[in-house]
Amino acid sequence: MTDIAKTDELFFTRTGMDRTKVEAQVDDALSGADDGELFLEYRQSESIAFDDGRVKSASFDTSQGFGLRAISGEATGYAHASELSEAAIARAAETVRSVRSGRGGTMAAPPPGTNQALYADINPLGELPFEKKVSLLSEIDAYARAKDPRVKQVSASLAGSWQAVQIVRADGRRAADIRPLVRLNVSIVVADGDRMESGSHGVGGRAAYDAWISPDEWQNQVDEALRQAIINLDSVPAPAGEMPVVLGPGWPGVLLHEAVGHGLEGDFNRKKTSAFAGLMGERVASPGVTVVDDGTLTDRRGSLTIDDEGTPTEYTTLIEDGILKGYMQDRMNARLMGMRPTGNGRRQSYAHHPMPRMTNTYMLSGDKDPAEIIAAAKSGIYAVNFGGGQVDITNGKFVFSCTEAYLIEDGKIGAPVKGATLIGNGPDALTRIKLIGNDSRLDTGVGTCGKDGQGVPCGVGQPTMLLESLTVGGTAV
């Protein structure tokens, strides 16, 4: 059965709505508009948290609803409701008609169809009974405590969701997608005397739980969280000042995501509020720097078969060999900028309008061996994992805290450091990249991107790279 047929059962057979009548309602509501759609959503989600040897919280939620949008020029009318009925859609239609200009807009061409399938439509929530999920988290707790007597606290969580969406356009075209998503996280606190440190690690993606709950897999997550925590027990205060910084592969791509990625989204560039606005075709990064957004990776957390406007996702080159080549676009901003949608129109839920958002954004590999990059730095900081950060999109200024970092001394990795923050400007930092490793990889599937109050799952990644100089905020005196 196709995703269209499966979602028809959810949105029409189950609710009693007549599909033909709903399509006529959409036609009428969007008459004279430039673009728009009816977005139907059904979602189940669960979360179980295990802390200090017991279940701390457990939740299960089912939500459903629709969002109806009409676009006229730059104006958007949007109405949503948790009630799936023809009457509710009729009420929403009265609201969205208010943006029609009266000039008789021509409805934009529909998104192209796709028959790709980037993930299975399995519902992970019903895969394991609740008792087995709790038992798994209990095993994680026991395993971590048995690994090292310094372990004082263990927190583990499982989260999963199953989302079904259907997009109905005024021209009668429909698109549908069924999206599983799961995540396993482990956090550990260790103590040695009066000193306490922590480490955490997680994994996830668009698949069933069984992809990550085999003993080999979850033990790897515990081992990695414990490794980070124990290393931090031996950390020394981080130095401060301008110095070379080497970023490790994988999750450190979150800095690229925040400091550069958001600035390459279409809406910020159309409004000229991005530091990259007006720079298409110009050099914005060092030679060798190629950054892409790829929503087509199988089973990845940030991947989508279609975006939330019905456009197939794609591999979009943003920066190629240092030259700005493209932006991430939804339908509205692409039309207003005279560009092509790239499948980056995303929304948190039916209650939110879509906007340009990243999927899996990462830098491609270079040709340098990572050890060669460390040696070339001679001194400075090697940052492997990051925590929180802040970015100003208008000028690219960022501040990121390192959760795992090391001194580089005489071209070798030295003592771990605590309290290091990286401070800089995204566009400027791109020009300071001097060496790019041959080890690009994506994160392990735990990223969530926030923008305008909406959160969506995403992926980040990069190879090892050397920035010749960056401001490090430290704690050393």
Image (tube, rainbow, N blue to C red):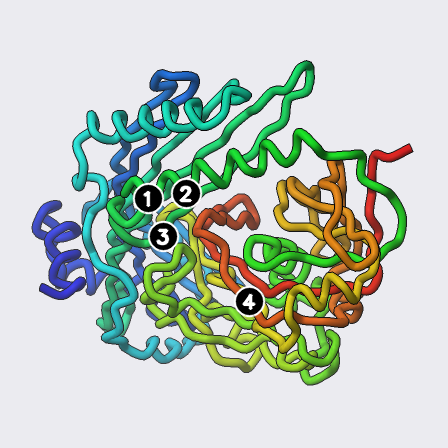
Q: Amino acid at mark 2?
A: Asn
Q: Position of residue 437 (x, y in %)?
A: 63, 69
Seen from the viewer's position, the closer of residues 470 and 230 is: 230
Residue 116 lies, with reference to residue 164, above or below; the image says: below
Q: Give the residue furthest to the bottom.
A: 281
The residue beneath circle 2 is 220
Q: Are marks 1 and 3 in contact (CB under 8 Å)?
A: no
Please report the residue visible at 65 percent of the width from the left and 42 percent of the height from the top: 404
SS at mark 4 in the image: loop
Q: Earlier in the sequence, mark 3 or mark 4?
A: 3
Label 1 is placed on what type of residue? Asp
The span from disc 4 to disc 1 (Cα, nearest Å) is 24 Å
The answer to which quarter of the image holds residue 1 is: bottom left
Q: Secondary structure at mark 1?
A: helix
Residue, disc 1: 216
As displayed, is residue 90 above or below residue 47?
below
Of labels 4 and 2, the one closer to you: 2
Mark 1 packing: few (<14 Cα in 10 Å), some, or many (20+)? few
Locate residue 113 relative to residue 103 in the image: left or right: left
| Number of marks in the rendered image | 4
Residue appearing at x 39%, y 70% in the figure: 313
Q: Are marks 2 and 1 in contact (CB under 8 Å)?
A: yes
Identify the element where label 2 is drawn: helix
Q: Residue at x 61, y 54 (%)?
A: 252
In the rendering, at what x and y percent does residue 183 appear? 37, 43
Q: Earlier in the sequence, mark 4 or mark 1?
A: 1
Figure check: 204 above or below 3: above
Q: CA distance from mark 4 to mark 2?
A: 21 Å
